[in-house]
Image (cartoon, rainbow, N blue to C red):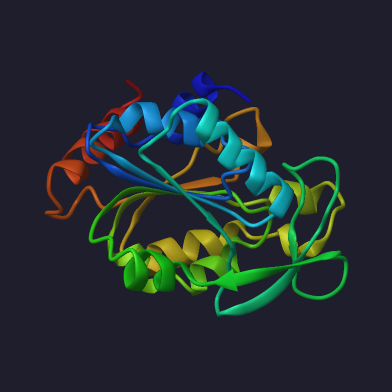
Amino acid sequence: PSRAAAREHLFHLYRPSPGDVLVDVGAGVGWDTLEFSHAVGPSGRVIAIEAHPTTFNRLQRMCELNGLDNVECWHFAAFDRKGSVSIQDGSNDLANRVCTSGGGVLDVEARTLDDVLCDVLKIETIALLKMNIEGAEVAALAGSERTLSRTQVAAIAAHTFRADQGEHECFDTRDAVFKTLQENGFDISTRDHDSRPWVRDHIHGSRHSRSCGDTSKRAGSALNLALEGK
């Protein structure tokens, strides 16, 4: 992973500006968080959410070592309700997933994004909502109705390519993510011809056609350029 990869991949429809609020759901050890922090500057704000306890500790340490004062780290699994869920505990932190039935070895707190982002943090506008949580994205989005209404651009990683490779059927989420974003008022952009399956499975949504302030105008310009092949 690299900061350059985050810029190329996640800033597909959106270009950060100082002062923006970005939400990183499934932050891992913080590769994207680091780029987000630098992109929005001291006046910006990054909410980094990670479910796995060991990975979360590494995320916090990364932020401390890099002096990322504009990052707030939250330890919970984004889900459709409060409670607890099980999560895998493999050596590859990028592959550990929340398990709703069997397969998990660690119990972690589950909360909705609406609870944390809207009720606790009271964030009014989210410039970019990034989500990469290994198959749990459908459940997380189900608990994000108000969050999505406050989001200008979404970059949601579906994981159907993992189901296609013979892994658990819970990874087959692309269509559901696409439908959820559409139903919540986003215009959708995908990169179906990219050679990388994880890029093809990323669903990018923008509110560019609505009057949502400067952020939506920037997103709209980027989307138009993409559609024009420029």
**Vertical arrangement, residue 220 with respect to residue 140, above or below:** above
Location of residue 18 in the rendering, given as x and y in whole percent from the top left corner? 22, 32
Q: Is residue 15 visible?
A: no
Location of residue 92 in the rendering, given as x and y in whole percent from the top left corner? 81, 40
The quadrant of the picture occupied by the N terminus is top right
Q: Is residue 152 visible?
A: yes
Query: Which quadrant of the figure has residue 118?
Result: bottom left
Location of residue 51 in the rendering, given as x and y in whole percent from the top left corner? 64, 57
Location of residue 218 in the rendering, given as x and y in whole percent from the top left corner? 21, 36
In the displayed structure, does residue 96 sit left or right of residue 213? right
Please state which of residues 222 and 156 is positioned toward the viewer in this rendering: 156
**Vertical arrangement, residue 144 with respect to residue 6, above or below:** below
* Residue lying at 55% horizontally and 80% vertically, measured from the top left: 81
**Vertical arrangement, residue 27 with respect to residue 1, above or below:** below
In the displayed structure, does residue 197 sit left or right of residue 115? right
The quadrant of the picture occupied by the C terminus is top left
* Residue lying at 40% horizontally and 71% vertically, measured from the top left: 114
* Residue lying at 55% horizontally and 38% vertically, measured from the top left: 192
Q: How many marks?
A: 0
In the displayed structure, does residue 134 sit left or right of residue 167? left
